[in-house]
Image: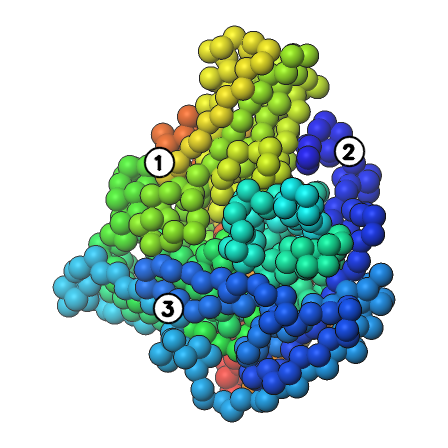
Amino acid sequence: MPRLGLENSRLLITGNGSYLADLEFEGCVDVCFVRSPFPNAEIARVRPPVGSGLSGAELGIRPLQLESRGLVSVPWDPIAIHRVRYVGESVAVVWGKDRYEAEDAVDATEVDYDRLPDGIPVHPEAPDDVLFSTTFDSGGFEEASSAAHAVIEGSFKAARQSALPIECRGVAASHDSASGVTTVWTSTQIPHLVRKGIALGLGVDEDLIRVLVPHVGGGFGVKAQVFAEEIALAALTRRINRPVRWIEDRWENLVASAHAHDTGVTMRVAVARDGTFLGVDADVVADVGAYSVWPFSASLEPATAAASLFGPYAIRAIKYRARGIASHRCPVGAHRGVGINAGVYATERMVDTIAHELNIDPFDIRRLNAIRTMPCTTAAGRELDSGDYLGLLDRLASASAYQELRRSQRQSRQEHRLVGVGIGFFNEHSGSGPSDYRRRGVTTISGEDSARVVVTHEGRLQIYTSAAEAGQGHAETYRALAGRELDIAPEMIDVFEGDTDACPKGTGTFASRGGVGVIEAVVQALRKVAQLDIAPGTDVTHVHEAKQLYPSGAHLAVVEVDADTFVPRVVRYVAIEDCGTILHADIVDEQVRGGIANGVGCALLEEHRYSAEGQILTASLLDYLVPLVADIPHVELHHLTNPSPGTTLGSKGVGEAGTIGAIAAVSNAVADAVFPLGVRLTALPYSPTRISDGMPEALPDR
């Protein structure tokens, strides 16, 4: 059983962790997948080596299919049987006594493809390739636009990107024919949802599947969906009655795990003469790839991006249309910040655009339009229970010496230096619970979070949760809470996660739910134990149904763009965060800093590109660029604390805030830096090529 003991951090930092690739099983075979080199073809024949490979039809996995409001339900065969729809889609599973032999079996597999012409639907069930569509209208936009001083338009595009954890995915499985139980070890953030997905794929009861999570070397959302490989290995071990193991390589990770974002937002904003935002009309279109990723569906990016537009602003009217369009590309799933990244990026770039149009300082227009009263329900229907948005902005102005920055920028421009200042102002939803998912029509995700606390006869305290540790420091936080609630020494507390047999059922680890639903479940379970006076033999479980909360932040970046090479460099970064009550200061701060590093990469470097023929052009880290240590600035981090009344301790979650704020702040800073050159940046990443391509033919005087 995965145990997060006191020695856990020590093991990890000394290189002695036990990751998926470190697990050894007697008689285990190594597995590889035969993957399609074509983006769109029918499968005429698959012939793996006899005795060391199976086609999708031979493996006999049931297709997974999602039902949700606004979603076109299309089947997803974990191993393609009739047709491939993107480069990297698996068509057969092969194995050998080691990885070398398994890769030889890949080369020996014969696959006949019939290439399909362009223009036919990705899925016949989805007219115009629209896999998901939804609309929202608060009412009042037409009246707002009629009364407005101006209706300003803008269009912005978030790039297709990868989460890129240091540890790629990995799965191992074994089957006990006597009990009928299949055990799956997988590097995942969602053990109970993986168990559910595997059971559906195999057509067996969930009780016959046990999922175990070893140490996880980062997830960042990409490990928060159920993958074909998890189902395939569970099926394969039952078929050949031997332990099996698959370790993803970086090529597979970039080509065939899950991508994210790839979302465009076009909007019209009605504004008053003084810069007050009156109403927003937006169209959100996301390329969601070839399939609806299970369990989130094709709604994940477009619906989340649309719901995030103008989140911290007192908009009186908002309407939007959001669509997920299928394509012959890798399916889109979760990545730190999910669609909030695209929504906040588009919003904050639009706010700067409006400020330029009306000749208002970007800070002043944000302060003018920030929501002032809490709690409140926004025009988009979000119920904000706490926060101080003016306080965030004012603290940012003070901590960054904003007015002095602008004076310094003017001096830099006189010296022909391209220096820009950018702000990212946002709120985000965290800890979505059952009511939030049902409201969106999502039935595959329970939204519950659970904790079980046991007092052993030796007097030790055992904490079990439905979450899965992937570097967030769960054990340290739970021990601190137990010490506070029960006055128990840390060395007397054991923490267990990532075992579907021992740990209570729940949703897993994503959407910053650890600081909301999971912590709430732990606290309530601990308090039940306290009421029983910590008696040996005590065993209590608490299931919490969280309600969506809204942490918030205001970030500022200063960027200098090299006037000759157009390479942007972040030279200063200031972040103000409100995640409610801070439960573990060091962990919170490093979560924010790590998120900012992620966001810097998203804003400046990272982009998956495909050829017109559907071939991925960024299948290695030579082509898919990520930030290095030298690219990440020192982060000046400050906190405001506005506890949420929605949790006992007032915490709101903080896992994604850094990424969301950084994408907006850094992109605005680059755009501000090159604005005097006549460059108008709208499509991420804001790379030297994008800047160069945006240069007008006749350069303005510098």
Where does the image place residue 451, in percent across and percent down from the top left? 52, 29
Disc 2, SS: helix
When the figure is inspected, residue 690 is found, relative to residue 425, above or below; the finding is: below
Say which of marks 2 and 3 sits in front: 3
Question: Which residue is denoted by mark 1 in the rendering?
Answer: 386
Disc 3, SS: loop
Instruction: Please state if 275 lies on the left or on the right of 694 as rendered.
Output: left
Q: Which quarter of the figure is the C terminus placed in?
A: bottom right
Q: Residue furthest bottom?
A: 117
Question: Which residue is denoted by mark 2 in the rendering?
Answer: 10
602 and 330: which is toward the camera: 330
- The three-letter amino acid code for the residue at tag 3 is Val
| Label placed on residue 72 | 3
When the figure is inspected, residue 47 is found, relative to residue 414, above or below; the finding is: below
Disc 1, SS: loop
Where does the image place residue 287, in percent across and percent down from the top left? 46, 71
Work out whether mark 2 precedes mark 3 in sequence or the reverse, and give the earlier one. Answer: 2
When the figure is inspected, residue 443 is found, relative to residue 79, above or below; the finding is: above
